[in-house]
Amino acid sequence: MNVSKLFRLNIIIHLFKTERNTELQKKSCKWYDDSSRNTNFDRNESKHTDPFKKMKFQLLFVAALIATSVAEFPPKYVDDPTSDVPAGHLKAFGYHRLPDGPVAEESGFLHPKTFWEKYVSIHKPMVYRNAVSDSPAIVNWSDQYLVEMFGDLDVILEVKRENRTKSPQRVSVKLFIERYRKEDVYAVTVMPDPMRADIQVPSCLLCGTFRDFVHETNFWMSSGGTRSVIHYDADENIHCIVNGSKDFMMMENKFKQYLPMFSKKQFSGSGFSALDPDSVDLVKYPDIAKVQWTYATLYPGDCIYIPSEYLHQVRSYQRTISATMLFTSDTSKSFQDTGCNNTSFEYTPLSDIDVHWTYKKGDKTIDMGYMNIEVLRKNILYIFNLRGEEFVTVKDFAHFYFIALEDVDEDEESQQEVEELFTKVFNVAKDGKVTKEQVRNLSRENLKVLARGIDSPHGPVEGEEDDLNNFYDKDEL
């Protein structure tokens, strides 16, 4: 680290100590009052009365700053008119052109309706500073704590240099903690139910449509050195940092026309690029120079809103833990402020939110990556509109099923599987009919059965033997 970075870091540390101490003294944290869980850790004290907890939070924050200051971010564009190759050729993504600036920022209280109007409704990304800074996880989630509190729960593992052609693996938190600093793996999984009590919900999700439509929460953890491919997701996403830091590069979806993209299923809302973000070949893909981007670095307590289908690429450099909350607007793509007038907007743990897809100990599958259940219900009702009838049969259902899953052969065996799924979900005979009213009143559990029938589980089911040695290519071992 050069002298200027050290000098800058010393100033930041001094300011952080002064401002953070003042901030902590002003706050009356409620998350140590949770006595509902039987733990070996004393949680019946506030942060501002324990100097050791304050010091630990400060050290975590400073460690993130040190790690980020070592990496050059945002990348520095240098135009060399004497060169025969485009600027940024064979360098990491971001060196191909100057950024359009940092991502827009908010701090303090953010009402869900304001969040909708300023950002979600217009698909504009936003950094929300200190949105979850009261989360107990920020202070508590050491390796030892995670093993003692959650060690028997399962997580899904991916390789650090994201490769979506490889199958994920399922192991216990304890086994992951034993291995994650030594092996090329990180955890990205549905957040186990007990963990959700340690994560604060940002104020912008605490009422109305957003609170009702949080359909999945995720736990991310690595020892650092991770980077994603350039990709976009189907869901609205709030990604929050618990430990460490992450760098984000954000690009509007319209720029995917300039990127080599893998083909996606007809009704899938996600996709990713075949581009190597560590070494961009601007000779082979000259149009990448047209891809505009903005940037953000997140620290513990910060979140970023990533709009659905918004291109992004993410990197981390040291031990990093994140919590993400996937949500949608309502099925009419609008925001309803139901209950907002009666919401106190006080500290709320994620465990208080009715999340659609969850994981608890003993679950056979970890239900990750499935669509919002209410969106699925709307898609079924759309079949009625297409047919112009008040009912659908198994034949109608099968027809749209095979359109949605274009990579499934419409053979006799598949047809029989669809018929069995139809009768199981709607509780009718194979020659029965289903009405709109039945679909509207269908339970979420039945809709989940349908979702699982349409898509495979993300990772192996409980009881399948996981061999992490088969998780890597030979040149990665």
Image (cartoon, grey):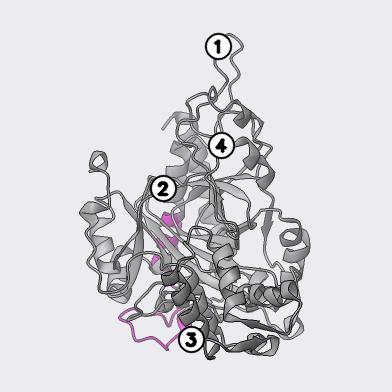
Q: Is residue 464 at least partly visible in the picture? A: yes
Q: CA distance from mark 2 to mark 1?
A: 32 Å
Vertical relation: 92 (above or below) 455: above
**Residue 194 on the magenta segment:** no
Q: Earlier in the sequence, mark 3 or mark 4?
A: 4
Q: Earlier in the sequence, mark 2 or mark 3?
A: 2
Q: Which residues are magenta?
A: 32-60
Does dot 3 land on a helix, a strand or a loop?
helix
Does dot 2 land on a helix, a strand or a loop?
loop
Q: Mark 3 touching mark 1, by CB under 8 A?
A: no
The percent position of residue 86, horizontal first and vertical second, equals: 57, 19
Q: Quadrant of residue 326?
A: bottom right
Label disc, if present, on residue 162 of the rendered structure: 2
Label disc, if present, on residue 83 of the rendered structure: 1
Q: Residues within 10 Å of mark 4 (few under 14, many from 20)?
A: some
Residue at image mark 4 = 74
Q: Residues within 10 Å of mark 1 (few under 14, many from 20)?
A: few
**Residue 47 on the magenta segment:** yes
Question: Which amino acid type is shown beneath numbered disc 4?
Answer: Pro
Quarter of the N terminus within the rendering? top left
Q: Earlier in the sequence, mark 2 or mark 1?
A: 1
Nearer the observer, disc 2 or disc 1?
Answer: 2
Vertical relation: 416 (above or below) 368: below
The percent position of residue 441, horizontal first and vertical second, equals: 64, 90
Label disc, if present, on residue 424 of the rendered structure: 3
Question: Which amino acid type is shown beneath numbered disc 3?
Answer: Lys
Nearer the observer, disc 1 or disc 4?
Answer: 1
